[in-house]
Amino acid sequence: MSDNLDDRGPADRTRVNIDEDYEARYWANKWGVSQDELRAAVGRVGVMADDVEQALKH
């Protein structure tokens, strides 16, 4: 089975990887925030997607 090159979301959807540009764009778009806001939230609460999402809601 070949990789789907059209799927540009993160490989591990439980963790936010801000080091890969396409992943940072994915998460920022998903939550409607800038990449800077996303990076700040990851800096505060870590890389777990659920934790980042909660931090961005506040």
Image: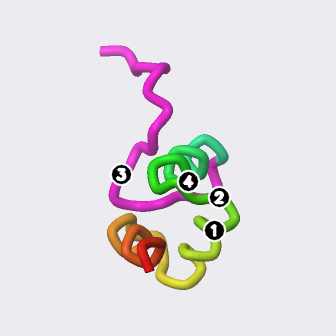
Could you say whether the residue bearing mark 4 is in a helix, strand or loop? helix
- Binning the other alpha carbons within 10 Å of mark 4 as few (below 14), some (14 to 19) or many (20 upward) gives some
Kind of residue at disc 1: Glu
The residue that label 4 is drawn on is 28
Kind of residue at disc 4: Ala
Viewer-closest of 57 and 27 = 57
Total count of labels: 4
Q: CA distance from mark 1 to mark 2?
A: 5 Å
- Marks 4 and 2 close (CB-CB < 8 Å): yes
| Residue at x 69% of width, y 65% of height | 36
Mark number, residue 37? 1
| Residue at x 50% of width, y 52% of height | 27
| Residue at x 41% of width, y 19% of height | 4
Please report whichever mark, 4 or 2, sits nearer to the chain's N-terminal start. 4
Could you say whether the residue bearing mark 1 is in a helix, strand or loop? helix
Q: Is residue 50 above or below residue 8?
A: below
Mark number, residue 13? 3
